[in-house]
Amino acid sequence: MGDALKDKIREYVTNEYVEEGSGVEIGDETPLISGGIVDSFSMVSLKLFLENQYKIKIPDADASAEAFDSVNRIALVVRKFAPKV
Amino acid sequence: MSNIGSYDERLKNFDWSIARRELGYDQAPTKNIAYFLADRNCEQGRGAKVAMIWENAEGDVARRLTFDDLRRYSNAYARLLEDLGVGPGERVCIFMDKIPDLYLSFIGALKRGAVAQPLFSAFREDSLLVRLMNAETTAVFTQKKFVQRFRHLRAKLPHLKHVVVVDGDASGLQAGEHAFDVVKAPPVEKYDIYPVDEETPSVLHYTSGTTGAPKGAQHVHGSLVSQYLTTKWVLDVTDKDVYWCTADPGWVTGTSYGIIGPWALGITQLVLEVGFIPERWYKAIENYKVTVWYSAPTAIRLLMKEGDAIVKRHDTSSLRHLASVGEPLNPEAVIWSEKVYGLPFNDNFWQTETGCIVISNYPGMPIKPGSMGKPFPGITATVVDAKNYEPVRTGTVGLIALRPGWPSMFRQYWRNEAVYKGKFHNGWYICGDRASIDEDGYFWFVGRDDDVINTGGHLVGPFEIESALLEHPAVAESAAVGKPDPVNMEVVKAFIALKPGYEASDGLKLDIINFVRKKLSPLAMPQDIEFMDGLPKTRSGKIMRRLLKARETGEDIGDVSTLEND
């Protein structure tokens, strides 16, 4: 059974940050920040999306480049503040 | 003993001929910068010396390129341009992540006599369009993943003839697109470097101003003279160093001090493809034994945020000299770096337009944390009154001004003479930054004199952002200002009045933020949006950015009615 949270994150990242026609596929462990798919400035928009989508507030300390570097890691951050998702 | 020795001694009888002699400049077969970066190093016996240590984004591949590799591969790029019919003087854009081909094609473009136009790979289509259109760029070197951006723009760029993909095969490429693998291409052992003189255009860097579109600051081959000497005296690099400049060559720091200066000195330098990841940065310093590190306040503040424990987990003992540029380095960062690395970051100041460091701290000179230092020998710098452009008294805030004529001073804003001339007053080049000079001659930054936003060390113009915002269907009016940020110094904040039928919401905010990011770049993307019923305006209808900015900074701007008459 799929993980709806991870699927949502993956869908958002693909639609917003993956270059059209680049053939890049976002796996659960695809390095997003260290792999250059999402840069540090764009992280702000990703954080805002997660906060809006899941009605949470992510403190800056939890929104580091390492914490946002993969779908799996982002899901961990979201579940820390929205355990029922 | 540092390269500069005594700063005060160097000030006496300084002449740029010091650099010309060390470069063998006047006897060299050509003034083309490319010769000094690759071929001259080979002639002087450094052909087998490592010029670039490159590590890929994932951190599992490291390549070492020698100066002979630089020579041969840049020859191949130059030959490619020639075969494509790209002639001297034409603008060649380089649009890539920090991969070896970025550096090789840059040097190759110079060898062909073309004007190299490196652009930051995060730029999206609107940002690319304005810069390529203005420069009438005829060729682009890029990566396969970026090809779509240029395809979408081609119809609006009649001068653009060739898009060359350097990292993939030809499958899927269309007319006017070519694949080129410099390693597999036929080797070019000998290439006749295009002859230039010191005033021949070399590099075009786009920079943002308060009004209008970004402007191309054009440099010349003679800029090498001051880029060479400032690298040697400010960054203090020697033959035995491993030097790391973290800047992307899409910005002037990444070309002046990430390509030209260090390789003219025959220095080994590190290039990391990965962006800012503290663990990877410290690992690289440890693995490659970086000795001289040139970075930016935003990165340094992020490293501070990361804490001291991560530093202790790595061996940074190889470091011997640190420097910083892009925005003023706060005193806390200078003190912190001395604590954790055993060395202070030496702040320095310069701009796209200056082409080289103009005010700096130097090895051996006491640092005053928070100060950008003193003028480089050969640079006459002062602070002038904003109205009459006369030097002000010690301690008084005014505009940083430089006496024109140093080798790397920009020669024009690309085909925009009026704006270029507007930067010079009373015999001074006016930088656009406000500062004061203390009784010891140290310069202290106060702020920008205009509405340009400095975010993460990059200048972004409000006009570009506001224009993009106005293209969003919900936006009726917009203003973009810099909002103070503890890490980036400023981030873009947008004030927006919505069209009838649209309601302010977090969802709309996100939509507008992503809209601008995809049109321009992540740098230009507002990180904060405030919706207003209407934006404050002057009597003539101009939006009062100064007022909005003052609200963000808490500055008291006094009688607003005077602004209303502006």
Image (tube, rainbow, N blue to C red):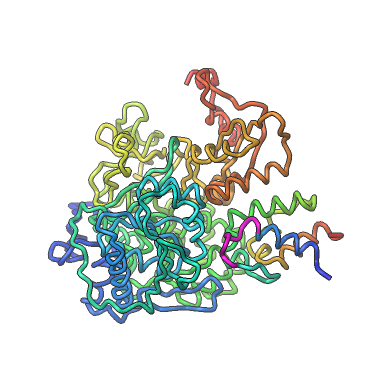
* Quadrant including the N terminus of chain A: bottom right
Residue, x 80% and y 57% (percent of image)? A81
Image-quadrant location for residue B471: top right
Identify the residue at image location x=53%, y=75%: B315
User: Does the image show residue B566?
Assistant: yes
Depth check, front residue: B320 or A79: A79
Tell me where residue B424 appears, x and y as whole percent: 29, 36
Which residue is depicted at the point 50% across and 61% down?
A: B146
Find residue B500 and report its horizontal and vertical position in percent. Answer: 69, 28
Most frequent secondary structure within the magenta stretch: loop
Whether residue B443 is situated above or below residue A75 in the rendered picture: above
- Seen as rendered, the residue at the extreme right is A84
Residue B511 x/y as whole percent: 67, 45
Instruction: Name, please, the residue furthest toward the front.
Output: B175
Choose between B77 and A49: the one closer to the eye. Answer: B77
Inspect this view and state whether residue B321 appears: no
What's drawn in magenta, residue-wise? A15-23
Q: Which quarter of the rendered picture does the C terminus of chain A lie within?
A: bottom right
